[in-house]
Image: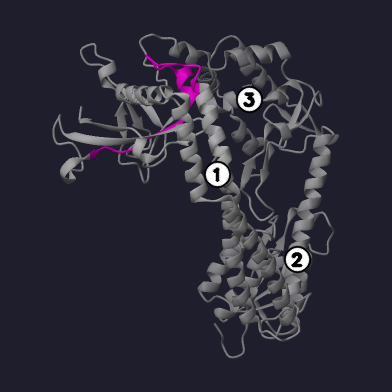
Amino acid sequence: MRTGNLTLVFAYLRLSNEEAHSGESSSIANQRQIIQDHCRRHGLTLVREFVDDGYSGGNFNRPAFQEMLRQLADGKANMVITKDLSRLGRDMREASYYAEQFFPERGIRYMTIADNFDTAHENVMAPFQFAMNEVYLRDGSRKVKDVLRSKRENGQYCACPPYGYRKDPADKNRLIPDEQTGPIVRRIFERAAAGDSSRKIALDLNADGVIPPLKYRVLFRDDFSPEGAARASDLWNYTTVKRILKNPVYLGHTLLGKSRKVSVKSKKKIAVPQSDWAVTHDTHPPLVEQPLFEQAQRNLGHGQRLRHADGDIRKSIFAGLVFCARCGHALCSCGTVYKGEREKYWYLSCTHQRGDIANRCAGVRIKYADLLEIIRRDLNELLALNDEQAEVLARAAAEKEQGASGAAAQQARLQQAQARLLTIDKIVTKLYTDNAEGKLDDDRLARMVQALEQESASHKAVIDALIQQAPAAEDVASRFRRFFDLAKQCSRIDVLDRETLLTFVERIEVGPKQFENGLRKATHRNTPYRQDIRICYRFIGALDEDVQPTLQKPCNF
């Protein structure tokens, strides 16, 4: 969008929370003044400013930045200016993409003032500038983690205060009871200790108009974006109540570090093993005493236990063990009662086939009695093997494993992939050096580095797969022997129960019904079908497909 020599400029300003504490040099006001002065001196028309205040440079999914891209796509400006490259972003790959490919390909000039980057000229030092900005990002992340680790080890509370507490005004790393919400927490524990279920407690809190935790934070404590505030519910639910009842923070203990980010560039978090949690006792005033806390824990799920004790309720022994082979979701117990018959109309059905679920499963189900008999029969066939037959089966599995992925061949592939990764690293370093010396142009550098990164990712995937592959053949035979040592404790199973099932089976997968003559569903009560069952046993996993059980019978509605 040009009129004569008119240049229309978008100014982009960014400041992360960490950088805000480092002084005024990178402040939003400082960035704004520098860009305005530059536009005034060079006769540039500053059309609009886009500001992301409090956003990390490691992620380009920032609201103002994305809005700027949409405005540029509409042709509202033909130039973008930032104070320096780090304001655009600190992720080396994405910052380089936007600065050296995205903007130039769309006829948009991009320049920085402090470090003299300009797409209208050659930028010989650009690769090193992008790299140093990422080093700053990683180093800053490391420093933050070190500070948080030190605080956790010293019992300082460096997270959002839980419901019932607030930060001590005299010491932001210490919790003190919240006068408004502390009594609510106490009430929850007292009602749970008295035998009320989590659901009943939630209903009573809603009836009394008590504001739930997230809504309380939105209204009275924390600053939320409009999108975040909109997600806050006005009602309590039993999950929130259970989360409070299980939290030892109300005993006066600090428990942190239960999750961590996948990487410095990702917001996704993964669970940390409980053994690695940072737990410090007696760091702040408790809201409940130990006896009250323990009584509440004993009553958690009490109603569910009473329900399971009811003799009129079907009790499946397959809970958590049976899954749909088509979509991977669990099969749940379901059925009806007709003329007093309960067992005849008892099924296990896929939980992922409701009409309101996107990409729902077409429907996998099996009669409970049929699956019970199949597992019992298959287990008895294994238990009936004598020592010699069990040893033959173990050796056959070991030989198959050796033939599928020999240890020597696996090690050779692993070493080859690792060696190629080292070579790729050296090549990339040499390419950047050649680029800096003017021997290699930027476009060719970008294409070559992209190709090498794709190859590197492929080799890394191969390495991960090889490392996670099944163990050596000797270990396979050893696991088979462990299973049959366990089987010696049981000669024959007449009635399959939960304890026996858990002893021998880890997972069961049920396939869909397959009808004859190309039929997609049963046409009448006696339509024959077959249904594959895959049983994964402890230590030995699933046996060969030719020995896996298959259900073949007329269809019963």
Task: Name the kind of residue labelled 1 in the image.
Answer: Ala
Quarter occupied by residue 113: bottom right
- For label 1, the SS is loop
The spot of residue 538 in percent (x, y) is 50, 30
Is disc 2 placed on a helix, strand or loop? Answer: helix
Q: Amino acid at mark 3?
A: Ile
Give the residue at x 54% y 70%: 71
Q: Earlier in the sequence, mark 3 or mark 2?
A: 2
- In reply to whether residue 531 is colored magenta, the answer given is no
Residue 236 visible from this viewpoint: no
Residue 506, relative to residue 369: is it above or below? below
Q: CA distance from mark 3 to mark 2?
A: 42 Å
Report the quarter where the N terminus lies: bottom right
Left or right for 24, reference 349: right
Image: 226 above or below 541: below
> What's under tag 2, amino acid-wise?
Asn
* Circle 3 residue: 244
